Amino acid sequence: MTPSKLSQWAGMAAMVAGVSYVIVGLFHPLNELASTDTRTWINVHYFACAMAFFGIFGMVGLYVRQAEQSGWLGLAGFVMLGLWMGLVLGFSFVEAFVLPELGAVAPRFVEGLMAMFTAPIDGIDLGILPTMWLVSGPLYILGGLVFGIATFRAAVLPRWSGALLAFGTAISPVAALFPFAYQAKVTIPVGLALVWMGYALWSETRVSTAAVPA
């Protein structure tokens, strides 16, 4: 396994993460008890798990490719986005594999967990989970904004993919102004940015690998 092959796989992972995030944005159902045992809810959170899992590996490749040129700004964005993806992976795993089974036996707990995403929690003690979810927001916004700016400045990967990532994460607070059915759509530019960056990394290393004589 050569460095070029690893970069290729990282580019593919970033593309899978981006496509998965677009699907989450397009089809995410309402955060309510009635949604948790539907096929749409389960499938969407499978894709959310894929976004976070493959996104972590994809981000490693995207950062390493431009580490020297992006400097400390790129490192800071990479760390924050990586931490956010790790948190999302944990939450999404619970939403995909636990909540659909838990809704029938502990609906009050599931309602409290749903309220964590949309409204103040009433009478349900979720321990550290609300704090973790609260921290994930700034990690996402600042991580995407900083990594996007670093990518734009480094000019190793397509500069406008970095601009799209920065824009997509920066506008995420605006989603709160929309009805919930439209809030998840704000994630689509970020997914597209990951696909763009991942394709650039994959195609670049694919071409360089093909150019090496056998």
Image (cartoon, rainbow, N blue to C red):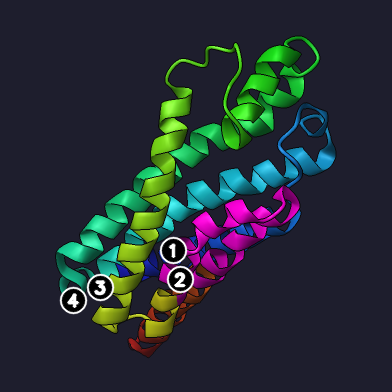
Q: Tell me which label, 2 or 4, sits earlier in the chain.
A: 4
N-terminal of the two: label 4 or label 1? 4
What residue is disc 1 on?
170
State which region is magenta. 164-193
State how far apart marks 1 and 3 are (Cα). 22 Å
Q: Are marks 4 and 3 in contact (CB under 8 Å)?
A: yes
Quadrant location, the N terminus = bottom left
Query: Which residue does the image show at 71% across and 46% down from the upper left?
Result: 44
Q: Which residue is mark 4?
A: 69
Crowd rating for badge 2 (residues with CA inside 10 Å; few <14, some 14–19, many 20+)? some
Mark 3 Cα within 10 Å, few/some/many (few <14, many 20+)? Answer: some
Is 114 above or below relative to 128? below
What x and y, as percent, mark residue 185?
66, 60
Residue 94 spot, x, y in % from top left: 60, 28
Q: Residue at x 35, y 85 (%)?
A: 208
Residue at point 42% right, 60% down? 58
Name the element at disc 3.
Answer: loop
Q: Report which residue position mark 3 lands on.
A: 66
For the residues bearing labels 2 and 1, Cβ distance under 8 angstroms: yes
Residue linked to disc 2: 167
What's the residue type where badge 1 is placed? Ala
Mark 1 vs mark 3: in front:
1
Q: CA distance from mark 2 to mark 1?
A: 5 Å
